[in-house]
Amino acid sequence: MPPSDLPFAPTLGATAARVPSTPSWVAKYLARVISCDVAVGVLAAILAATLRFGEAVQWQYLLVSLLVPPVWVLALAMSNAYERRYLGVSVEEYRAVTRAVIGMLAVLAVSAFILNVLLARLYVLILLPVLFVGGLLTRFVMRRWLTGRRMRGDLMQRTVVVGRADAVASLVRSIKSEPAQGLMPVSVCASGLDGDWNMVPSIEGVAVAGRPRDAVAVADRAGAEVVAVASHPDLAGKSLRRLAWALEERGIELIVSPGLLDVAGPRLSIRPSSDLSLLHIERPAAGTRTILFKQLMDRTLAALLVLALSPILIVAALAIKLTDPGPVFFRQKRVGIRGEVFEIYKFRTMVVDAEARLAALQARSDGNGVLFKMQNDPRVTKVGAFLRRYSIDELPQLFNVINGDMSLVGPRPPLPAEVEQYEPDALRRLHVRPGMTGLWQVSGRSDLSWEESLRLDLRYVDNWSPIGDLRILLRTFHAVIRGSGAY
């Protein structure tokens, strides 16, 4: 095949290449971030000098304080804190702040050694933490602002999705479900369509503009800033390399989906070799030390929460006892880790014969096919409705956590009857201890389909971490404060 007929063939000089300029919103966003970083540098320098020396600041420290803001911005830039590809979508922004602070410490230490100057330790101990906290806070606030704009459809990158039709459909759905990523599919180049591609107007609501070999031309016509390649055997090796070259000539970003489902970034790393780069996938965090650490964290936090929430527990128990005959607690058999059955504790929010009346209500379930959910369940008492609204009925499960039957965060503990309906993939939910709250509970709960709930639970099982657990707990606390319903 002559070079001119190769898919995505590069051109000498790229005379016809379209080189898009940086979108104006990116420049404005970076200008705001840099301005905030300068302000943080000024504030850190003033606080460090004032708190250490008061009004009698030595001239050496005045000079150091004047240099702090520009050096801080330079350290952030060298740490890739202003990389466009990380804006609003990657924790790399936060890691860059850590690297910049370490760089600042190194610069101060080396400068003091070369100039034979002893820097006041208190000055440094005030300066660096303020820079660190200020840098993180700046990015947190700016990311929240950017995410809010993207949720309204603003500040998005026009994206062409390329690959086999089924993989393209899956990738488009994923992109549309996470607008915070900042990608907006505008065209599709797909293979594997039934008949001619002209007969298929769209995939997942996005216009089909050609086949994968037309990706570069379609990106030019659509004014795209990003080309996203779905997993495809024909778009690998030399073809993918030529596509990368062609997009490089045009200043268009290339994103490749490896086809891995719900594998978090910390588990992925690149293992280079002489011919190609290999994607290394670490095993889930299921080692003995990490499991013991999770159990220790769970039980400690649960014990502290029991002490802190004991007035609420007592008031709730009295309210149930005084307003409705029957026991205060509801006990039920649930399936835990490795299929072990345990007894879960909850405040009773329904009438005493609720279980006997369940069969008559199954047809009116608002759940997702496996889990029973019902809006305005007639079995719920008035006190129970209030307890459910603020998830107070779940608090006795803290004793399950202390006993080691449950974790604070994890998949919800299923009923034995639900486990009997599980397909093989769903059984992996039982590889970790069930939790009082979890990823799917803070992502939509009963509003999600069973397949989506299962996907989120499996994602948690394969990618859990202590930091991830804390994030889910914070999101749960926020949802409970808003009174958005029971878990």
Image (cartoon, helix red, strand yellow):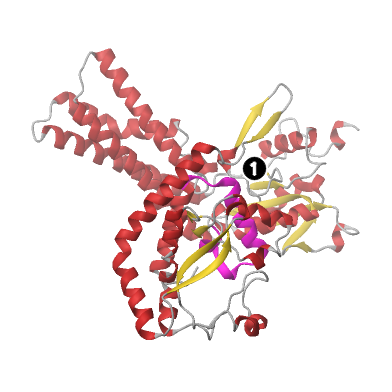
Give the x, y percent position of residue 440.
56, 60
Q: Main secondary structure of the magenta part?
A: helix
Q: Residue at x 21, y 26 (%)?
A: 121
Give the x, y percent position of residue 332.
54, 69
Q: Which residue is mark 1?
A: 252
Number of residues whose C-alpha sits closer than 10 Å to that of mark 1, classed few (under 14), some (14–19) or many (20 or more):
many
Q: Residue at x 31, y 18 (%)?
A: 110
Q: In this figure, what is the number of numbered marks?
A: 1
Can residue 341 be seen by looking at this rendering?
yes
Q: Classify 316 as above or below 100.
A: below
Q: Is 485 on the left-hand or right-hand side of 415?
A: left
Which image quadrant is residue 52 in?
top left
Q: Is 94 on the left-hand or right-hand side of 175?
A: left
Which image quadrant is residue 207 in?
bottom right
Q: Is 103 on the left-hand or right-hand side of 419?
A: left
Give the x, y percent position of residue 445.
55, 67
Can residue 185 be seen by looking at this rendering?
no
In this rendered view, identify the residue nearer to me: 388 or 160. Answer: 388
Q: Classify 240 as above or below 207.
A: above
In this rendered view, identify the residue nearer to me: 484 or 136. Answer: 484
Q: Classify 255 as above or below 437.
A: above
SS for dot 1: loop
Tell me where the magenta segment starts and ends, as one range.
Answer: 438-467
**Does the magenta segment cover residue 446?**
yes
Identified by mark 1, the residue type is Ile
**Does the magenta segment cover residue 482?**
no
